[in-house]
Amino acid sequence: FPLHHVLTREFRCKSSPQMAASLIAHGADPLAKYQTSTVLHQILSEGDEEAVDILLNLSRDIPGLDPNAADDRGLTLFQLACLCNIRTSYNKEGGFFYRARDAPTPAARLLSLGGDVRLQDSQGNTALHLLAGKKQDSNDVEMVRVV
């Protein structure tokens, strides 16, 4: 999908947010289906916070963006964001930076867009179950507080 392509690390440039906005304005759908998931599910699972932020910043321009949209495993965008708990991103030089402490995580942003903490995946897990099953770090503990 062109929208996914323009946001991948390998091809992203300064004008990627504008290109993504233009693609969305002309009908590109971040919830377009791959075989088992959506474009936004793929971007979340790749752990690329910058790409996720670009799409979430455009969320008001995306008709029908549903944080509870599920992939074939029943994982919602919100659950996947909790599971990935994106906290770093990479710049063009290959270095990385951490999210500013006061900046909302993608999971928190999806929660504010209507992410439902009670929804279950195909195995009956909620976001809290998924977080509890992970090897914990301080960011995961913070996500448990959010959920």
Image: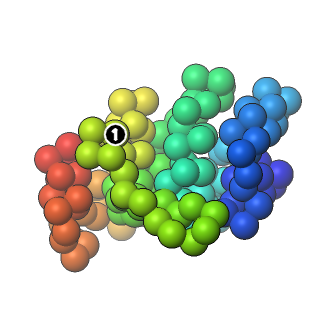
Question: Could you say which is closer to the camera, residue 35 or residue 88?
Answer: 88
Quadrant of residue 27 within the rendered picture: top right
Residue furthest front in the image: 93
Q: Is residue 6 above or below residue 68?
A: below
Residue 145 in view? yes
Total marks shown come to 1
The percent coordinates of residue 10 (x first, y second) are 72, 67
Drawn side of residue 144 relative to residue 47, left or right: left
| Residue at 61% over, 31% down | 58
**The C terminus: image quadrant:** top left
Q: Is residue 1 above or below residue 136?
A: above
| Residue at 29% over, 54% down | 127
Question: Could you say which is closer to the camera, residue 3 or residue 76?
Answer: 3
**Please, what secondary structure does the residue beneath circle 1 have?**
loop
Question: Could you say which is closer to the camera, residue 92 or residue 117?
Answer: 92
The percent coordinates of residue 33 (x first, y second) are 71, 53
Q: Identify the amino acid type marked 1.
A: Ala
Residue furthest bottom in the image: 135
**The N terminus: image quadrant:** bottom right
**Residue beneath label 1, please?**
103
The percent coordinates of residue 101 (x first, y second) are 26, 46
Drawn side of residue 20 relative to residue 96, left or right: right
Drawn side of residue 126 relative to residue 80, left or right: left
Tell me which colouring the rendered structure shows.
rainbow
| Residue at 46% over, 42% down | 68
